[in-house]
Image (cartoon, helix red, strand yellow):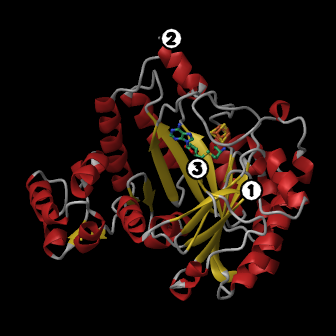
Amino acid sequence: MAQTVEGIVAPADGSLEESVLIGADSRTFHAYLHIPFCRVRCGYCDFNTYTASELTDVSQSTFAATIIKEIEFAARVIETRGLPKRQLATVFFGGGTPTQLPASDLVSILAALESAFGIAAGAEITTEANPDSVDASFLQELAAGGFTRVSFGMQSAVPHVLKVLDRTHNVENLPVVVAAAKAAGLATSVDLIYGAPTETLEDFRLSLAAAIALDPDHISAYSLIVEPGTKLARQIKVGKLPEPDEDEQADKYLMADSMLADAGFDWYEISNWAKSEAQRSKHNLAYWQSQDWWGFGPGAHSHIGGTRWWNVKHPSAYAGKLQANASPTQARELLDEKTQAVEKVLLEMRIGAGISIDRIKIASDQPERVAGVVADAIARDLIEAKAAIGGQLVLTLPGRLIADALLRELLG
Ligand SMILES: C[S@@+](CC[C@H](N)C(=O)[O-])C[C@H]1O[C@@H](n2cnc3c(N)ncnc32)[C@H](O)[C@@H]1O
Ligand code: SF4
């Protein structure tokens, strides 16, 4: 196979290497579905998503049929390779805005997954939703069709912050849709972003209080990333908006952790808090634990047993490939053992349960230095001493603030 800078070219029939079989019985199987449509693009977002006016040659109305073609294609690839039959342990519809599609489309896509792979009993089936794109009947239809969880993009409860972020929803809409989701029997999560230009500490406190008042099962709080090429990056570059301040971001994180802990939410990953273990996002945990997942849709990434691949980005190129009965893969990568070990550390170090120090040694370029860095991190209160004595690296609250720098020291 030809090696490209971007990865290796995947065969048109999508067939997978034999190496994906190794250990497959001990990994769980998950599906991610990328729905690449939004009503408007938020100025900070660089996700692979398009507004109606940006897509002249692809219709949202045929998207469900196209992604179902990929589901059928995947089932053939998996069967041909002889992978064990594994029912889906979780399904996650993300975007973009999955709820730009009618609920009936989302339910049909889920039904196609069920008939292709089966869905495990008690599986977590989530969709992301923008608060202004759903109502009670939409949520009831999702629940009746097998969805178990909805994750709302709340971002902030403060109108001037929502405006800077180009969010279109009304603050008053959140309690209405969260209550409707609960009434439909769905578990609920809300996403917050902190650090938008002009957002004060008090603004973020109000947003946290509003999120807590919704009494969801789960809350995510992400530090705003200024993505190159976005409208927000341009506004900051020309001095129209101030850049997020690192110290203020740290203060906001500390405030989030303390207010969420007081309200009964435990952190289980740097940006994620849940009311109990059962309410954690099992889908995200599967990513962090390097399980197997197939990512369906334009630009979606997949990972099965050390082979990683990603689909062509544009929805019309994606549809074109599937219409021609070809794999929509752009390229793939075979991860060697060392790369897999490094990735495991990068992901698992962010989890509340932490990662074994032996695994860090396997991934490190200088394993003989790891013990010294660990001892120094204990002295600086970045990791928990008791866990480290037991061989596990678990971040403390100050450690969570500088997790990336600590990782570089451990792996360097
Ligand atoms: C891609 S969105 C999809 C869900 C839905 N479209 C929405 O916006 O609510 C998923 C989450 O990613 C987060 N996100 C997107 N861009 C971000 C950025 N530049 N920095 C931090 N978080 C970001 C937001 O919190 C958002 O809720
Ligand atoms: S943040 Fe969500 S709604 Fe906004 S452009 Fe990105 S995917 Fe679309």
Q: What number is the disc on residue 91?
A: none
Upstream in sequence: badge 1 or badge 3: 3
**Residue 319 in view here:** yes
* Residue corresponding to mark 3: 6
Q: Position of residue 252 (x, y in %)?
A: 35, 37
* Residue corresponding to mark 2: 238
Q: Position of residue 11 (x, y in %)?
A: 73, 66
Amino acid of disc 2: Val
Q: Residues within 10 Å of mark 1 (few under 14, many from 20)?
A: many
Q: Residue 16's image quarter?
A: bottom right
Residue 53 higher or lower than 126, as above or below? above
Image quadrant where one finds the N terminus: bottom right
Amino acid of disc 3: Glu
Distance of mark 2 from mark 1, alpha carbons?
A: 35 Å
Q: Position of residue 157 (x, y in %)?
A: 54, 35
Choose between 159 and 4: the one closer to the eye.
4
**Residue 63 in view here:** no
Upstream in sequence: badge 2 or badge 1: 2
Q: Residue at x 35, y 42 (%)?
A: 253
Q: Is residue 151 left or right of residue 255?
A: right
Residue 226 higher or lower than 23, as above or below? above
Q: Residue at x 24, y 53 (%)?
A: 412
Q: Is residue 121 left or right of residue 342?
A: right
Secondary structure found at label 1:
loop
* Residue corresponding to mark 1: 297
Q: Residue 254's image quarter?
A: top left
Ligand 1 closer than 8 Å to label 3 CB: no
Q: Residues within 10 Å of mark 2 (few under 14, many from 20)?
A: few
In the rendered image, the residue lying farthest to the front is 2
Distance of mark 1 from mark 3, alpha carbons?
A: 19 Å
Residue 19 higher or lower than 101, as above or below? below
Amino acid of disc 1: Gly
